Image: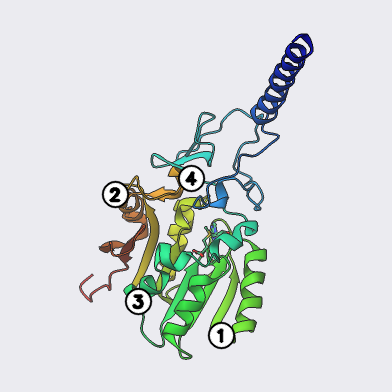
Amino acid sequence: MAPRRSSFHLCCVFCALLSGVLWLLLAQGWVNVPASAQDKPAVVEKPAVEKSKEEPEESDPPKDTKRYQYRRDHDLNGTGKFYMGREIAQVMSFHGAPWLERPEREEEERLSALVKLLKLKPGMVVADVGAGSGVITILMAREIGDDGKVMAIDIQKEMLQLLGEKLSRVGVKNVELVLGTEKSPKLEPASIDLAIMVDVYHEFRFPFEMMEELSKTLKPGGRVAFVEYRREDPDVPIKLVHKMSEAQVKKEITQPEFGLKWKETITDLPRQHIVVFERPVKTDKE
Ligand SMILES: C[S@@+](CC[C@H](N)C(=O)[O-])C[C@H]1O[C@@H](n2cnc3c(N)ncnc32)[C@H](O)[C@@H]1O
């Protein structure tokens, strides 16, 4: 009996040691617990884009500006930078491109239905701001035909490179790639019929500056559409900082500086809403 009892004791000591080591690794963050398949990889990836000059370093005391506030105590998937009561999410790295290209995305987000809901017409000029690897860019380019054009804007050149290679592979020619900055989409004023941001706006580091610039690029009567995961719906399986409520989008976009008017909110998609604003056509009397 004695040898059996001692091997039992040895086994217990070994298990206790093993769980201690595992606990230490997890607590120190040396081992990542895999995110669920439906989670956006942005929440586990480090953003590829450089830290903005305005953002304080870890060791600096938080530096608030009039428009943006910085808090140490914040969502782990956010940046610690706040705008109009909302925490700005981390920019999704180009390493996350396979998640954008996942085959089940069509079923989960019904992208082809989304493109139909935008009421695109042949010959339109569309800006896909935050185009990423271009899944929606290509759908829209086909919808507007050879007389139309999609301006595909992103701040990560690696994303634009992936998109460029895909365009050559599939033979789509009516897309222009534009390397934007964190504060500007780098488009011509009054040149765009529709600007669209699919799962993008909530990660803008400078949402005010971006919108100030983007609103000027719309033609009179032009529209801007925000496609965001519905924060109001707890069943949408996306981390909180990557979701936006309709009320929050409206609050941020109807600021007088942008001169935009809410037009409609489309709720036909399974996980996202499409909140659409318009640059009004000025009458002669104005
Ligand atoms: C989650 S991905 C979405 C990509 C694409 N819209 C899609 O749904 O397949 C967000 C993209 O927005 C880009 N982005 C973030 N901030 C941006 C900015 N200020 N201007 C342009 N693109 C930006 C990121 O680089 C990233 O490629």
The residue carrying mark 4 is: 88
Q: CA distance from mark 2 to mark 3?
A: 24 Å
Q: Label 1's element? A: loop
Residue 172 image label: 1
* Residue 118 percent location from the top left of the image: 34, 73
Q: CA distance from mark 2 to mark 1?
A: 37 Å
Residue under the point 39% across and 61% down: 227
Q: Which quarter of the rendering shows the N terminus?
A: top right
Q: CA distance from mark 4 to mark 3?
A: 29 Å
Q: CA distance from mark 1 to mark 3?
A: 19 Å
Q: Say left or right for 250 vs 211.
A: left
The residue carrying mark 3 is: 116
Q: Label 4's element? A: strand
Circle 2: residue type:
Ala
Circle 4: residue type:
Ile
**Residues marked 2 and 3 touching at CB (< 8 Å):** no
Residue sticking out furthest to the right = 3
Q: Can you tell which quarter of the image residue 125 is in?
A: bottom left
Q: Label 3's element? A: helix
**Residues marked 2 and 1 touching at CB (< 8 Å):** no
Mark with earlier residue (1, 3): 3
Which of the two discs, 4 and 3, sits closer to the camera? 3
Residue 247 image label: 2
Mark with earlier residue (2, 3): 3
Vertical placement of residue 61 versus 119, above or below: above
Vertical placement of residue 101 versus 13, above or below: below
Mark with earlier residue (1, 4): 4
